[in-house]
Image: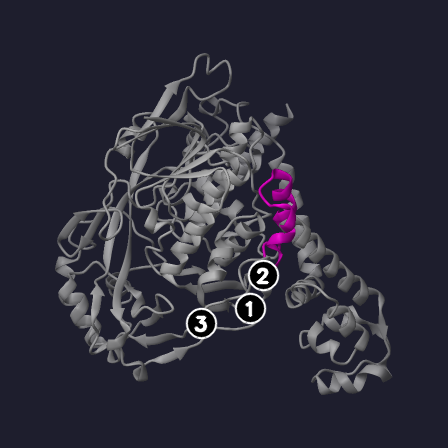
Amino acid sequence: MTLNYDVLVIGGGHAGCEAATAAANMGAKTCLVTMDMNKIAQMSCNPAVGGIAKGQIVREIDALGGQMGLVTDATAIQFRMLNRGKGPAVWSPRAQCDRGKFIWEWRRVLDETPNLDIWQDQADELLVESVPYAEALSQPAKQVVGVRTIWGCELKAKAVIITAGTFLNGLLHIGRKMVPGGRIAEPAVPHFTESITRHGIRSARMKTGTPVRIDKRSVHFEDMERQDGENDFHQFSYTGPHRQLDQLPCWMCYTTPEVHETLRSGLADSPLYNGQIQSIGPRYCPSIETKLMTFPDKDQHLLFLEPEGETTNEMYLNGFSSSLPMDVQIAAIRKIPGLRDAKVYRPGYAIEYDFFDPTQLKHSLESKIVGGLFMAGQVNGTTGYEEAGGQGTVAGINAALYCAGSAPFIMHRDESYIGVLIDDLVTKGVDEPYRMFTSRAEYRILLRQDDADARLTEKSYELGLAKRARYDWWIEKKQHIEEIEEFCKTTSVKAKEINSGLEHLGTTPIERGCKIVDLVNRPQLSLASLSEIIPSLKEILNRPNNRKEEITEAAEIRMKYKGYIERERMVADKMHRLESIRIKGNFNYKEMYALSTEARQKLTAIEPETLAQASRIPGVSPSDINVLLVLMGR
């Protein structure tokens, strides 16, 4: 049997769901191929979305018209804004979700998306054809035409997006036991990697893991510290309804020297240390056994016991990822005071899987080697639902544009964390699972969680992904923000009218009249507090709109950090000059002996599109860039 589509998405995880809905919402006839329709967007590890820098990515997905923010808000059982003690450039939303409801909310979204079919099956072979006169047409020599499944169905498409997560030749580890699988109790996908690499695409192996799951009925919560969420106006989506489920606490506890002693007794059987696992895992999310080896002098490590759902008894022990033998894991857990009687649903495990070198991709996430083939998510060497969703959104957009013969949509480093993520992948490659941090972005003040819609919604609307209602809401919000800013810049207050109020707010009185914006810029004051002593400001802030707190916060940040924002914008604009200097196809780097040997090798391998991208390649020095600039001048 043969089925024909514009876009084919292989894998129903976070990248696949965003890719499929993005392509379909842009008008491409799309099919999502998944092994199990009942595990759409399964949260394989912690059922949480967001976190440091990751929360910004989810807000960007939402600003583009993607779905992750909406699904998260609909299924959140705890919400927190992280990094509040720092500046708003690094504030990051995070939500604990109901794992089961998250799946079914995503399934509802997919079922209601026009132009989107779902096919339950397993990809077995990538179908590729040679392109006649490819070199003369400046195209890859090969073109993807579809996929053949294990049941013999041929799914033909103009573009294929691979979002297979950890399933490609996945291998699970618990102690010395090894079982093929893409997740616990789910089969691995053999052969498909080989059907891709035979066309010249390089693959390698990575490792990740997940902790034990515990029955909350066996937990002594009285021995733990309760951590409640926040219930203010913040959320992930700019347009969706506020949190609807019961909000639940998380709990903090610690390992002890006795726990560590028990864990060390099993290290000889640890796949990480007995040579069983050869691939590289994430440094920033280490297993508990890696923590013991890396920090041998620490007597305790902080753990978070987090709920998996609104009604389930299953809880997740964050910080205790492990692949030690199950008897060692359980014995160690029961030496944690609050878990002395713990009943375990399943132990932690590690998983090894195939990924593809992302330097073989363009910034559109299309393969440089096989035309029409896109990749997103963990197959590109990343980790995290958010990083996967961001890539899936971009891959879905560009696959739809590819089918329409339109120019690709490229996200830049100064307009989104997604742009930073993709540029890092295709320019630098990966030597460990890539996770986004705020420190990876050089323009953090421009890439705040509060202004993702300001950066991206109008662009997405022009592309056709963000719909009219999404666009209209942003325009309305933009107008309200500008009204507040203009009012504060042009409205004066007199000392005699306001000084008693300022003293009540705990700040120094003014000696003479000033503009409201001058008061907003004081660290101790906010628009909300000033509105209590300036009636005209209160009237402006309370004008009817959907999300007045969000609008007020956005306006306040823009005023308080105006100087920093403008200075960073100037730096970003200077870098744009290098971004505009296109160099691909202009040089034979192998013969450019004025460049260092390492620069020649790296530039030949990556083939950067622009001079700015070349400057970010590890091993390409400023002097090498100067050589290219001189030659471009000639």
Query: Residue visible at 37% across and 58% down?
Result: 284
C-alpha span from label 2 to label 3: 30 Å
- Residue 434 location (% of width, % of height): 40, 49
Q: Amino acid at mark 2?
A: Ala
Marks 1 & 2, CB-CB < 8 Å contact: yes
- Categorize mark 3 by other alpha carbons within 10 Å: few (<14), some (14-19), many (20+): few
Residue 305 lies in quadrant: bottom left
Q: Is 215 in front, or is 527?
A: 215
- Which mark sits nearer the N-terminus, 3 or 1? 1
Q: Amino acid at mark 1?
A: Lys
Residue 296 lies in quadrant: bottom left
Q: Which mark is residue 246?
A: 3
- Which mark sits nearer the N-terminus, 2 or 3? 2
Residue at disc 1, secondary structure = loop
The quadrant the N terminus occupies is: top left
C-alpha span from label 1 to label 2: 8 Å
Asked if residue 617 shows in the view, the reply is no
Which residue in the protein does label 2 denote? 89
Q: Is 275 in front, or is 56?
A: 56
Residue at disc 2, secondary structure = helix
Residue at disc 3, secondary structure = loop
The part of the chain drawn in magenta is 446-469
Which residue in the protein does label 1 denote? 86
- Residue 128 location (% of width, % of height): 36, 23
Q: Is 632 in front, or is 198?
A: 198
